[in-house]
Image (cartoon, rainbow, N blue to C red):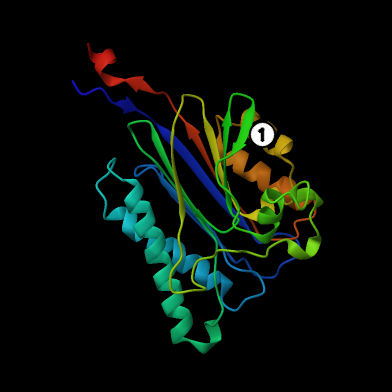
Amino acid sequence: MADEFQADWRMAMLSDVGRMRVRNEDFVFCDEHLGIAALADGMGGHAGGNVAARLAVDAWVQRMRKCLPGQIEERDLRVAAADANRVVYAAALSDPALRSMGTTLVAACFRRDGTLLTSNIGDSRMYRLRGDVLTCLTCDHSVLREQCDAGIIESESHGPLALRGLLTRAVGVAACVIADVTISSLQPGDVYLLCSDGLNEMLPDADIAHVLGALSGNPRLAAEHLVDLANDRGGVDNVSVIVVSSGRFGRLGAELA
């Protein structure tokens, strides 16, 4: 019998306009059966941000659905990101009302062999809670992040307000864009979170970790609580989350031996 992992993923997604915006420019998608999730945050203040977010996620999902279940590879995520960029860029060129639109895109594939593939462009994030440790698995493509890495500012929380939201990489603003793709291992009890910056700008890591840890058995409730907290803290932006809880992992070969 093949030595492979067995996993049962529970996913929940939620997107909210927040307390200060009049339009939701985020778009989310998840599919438990395929083990995929994607979230986009349309570029605020630009024409068609909501259109860009929807087009990017739709294009990404279409590419993933062409792959055989459980056999999605790193290259597939890169191609899917390129597809999303091409679709958004073409739409912006074809319609003057949509010129300069763009979006972030963070996406993940939870493979049944215990492998996690993560892709991101922009500053939407993916977190992992493993035990009591919350880790951000993505790196923001932003001016603020670059200044942190260069040692110009101590941390993103100390950065000037004017730099927040200034992206160095986004979907649809140029003919080509390169996604960061990482491969890691899934472990029993892991909890994952994909989110727009409307969440992490409002909540410190400690609060995010507390909610994910306390409500890991109920992804839907965790998603609702995170969004409610962000809105309670001001809700200055759209708030979108996808919470993914791992079920039991087991070696099929060992179980059936």
**Residue 175 or 205: which is nearer the viewer?**
175
**Residue 164 or 151: which is nearer the viewer?**
151
In the displayed structure, would residue 122 be above or below residue 252? below
In this view, the residue farthest toward the top is 257
Location of mark 1 (residue): 209
- Return the x and y of residue 24 as percentages of the image width and height: 62, 66
- Return the x and y of residue 120 as percentages of the image width and height: 50, 53
Toward which corner of the image does residue 50 lie, by quadrant?
bottom right
Q: Residue at x 31, y 45 (%)?
A: 72
In this view, the residue farthest toward the bottom is 96
In this view, the residue farthest toward the left is 1
Quadrant for the C terminus, please: top left
Tell me: 107 left or right of 255.
right
Quadrant for the N terminus, please: top left
Q: Residue at x 75, y 60 (%)?
A: 236
Q: Residue at x 60, y 66 (%)?
A: 25
Tell me the kind of residue under disc 1. Ala
- Return the x and y of residue 109 as percentages of the image width and height: 40, 44
Label 1 Cα crowd, 10 Å radius (few <14 / some 14-19 / many 20+): many
Tell me: 145 left or right of 67.
right
Toward which corner of the image does residue 84 lie, by quadrant?
bottom left
